């Protein structure tokens, strides 16, 4: 969860990321849900259907918050 901590701590959140997300807690929940999927990918293991659905749902939430049209 190093990436999440870099984003939410210090001025990173207030200066860069906070304006995109509903709340810091909402962002943290998305990142926590994605952590096991990132771990699976990082260890070059195949994604099971549940992982794919989590990636699709949370990835969509984050991309929409950043203004990416999907």
Image: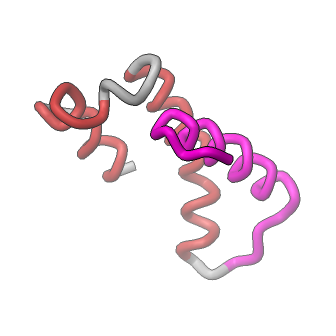
Q: Residue at x 83, y 64 (%)?
A: 48
- Tell me, yes or no, whether the highlighted magenta stretch contains residue 50: yes
Q: Nearer the viewer, residue 39 or 30?
A: 30
Q: Say which residue appears at 45% left-offset and 31% top-offset.
A: 28
2 w.r.t. 16: above or below:
below
Secondary structure mostly seen in magenta is helix
Inspect this view and state whether residue 59 appears.
Answer: yes
Q: Is residue 26 magenta?
A: no
Residue 29 x %, y %: 53, 30
Q: Where is residue 56 drawn, in percent x and y? A: 73, 50
Residue at far left of view: 11
Please tell me which residue lies in front, 49 or 12. 12
Q: How many marks?
A: 0
Left or right of 26, for residue 70:
right
Farthest-out residue, bottom: 44
Q: Quadrant of residue 15?
A: top left
Relative depth, front residue between 13 and 42 = 13
Residue range in magenta is 45-70
């Amino acid at each position: 969860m190093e990436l999440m901590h870099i984003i939410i701590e210090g001025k990173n959140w207030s200066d860069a990321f906070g304006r995109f997300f509903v709340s810091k807690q909402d962002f943290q929940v998305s990142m926590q849900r994605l952590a096991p999927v990132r771990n699976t990918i990082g260890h070059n293991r195949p994604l099971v259907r549940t992982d794919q659905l989590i990636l699709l749902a949370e990835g969509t939430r984050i991309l929409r918050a950043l203004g990416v049209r999907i």
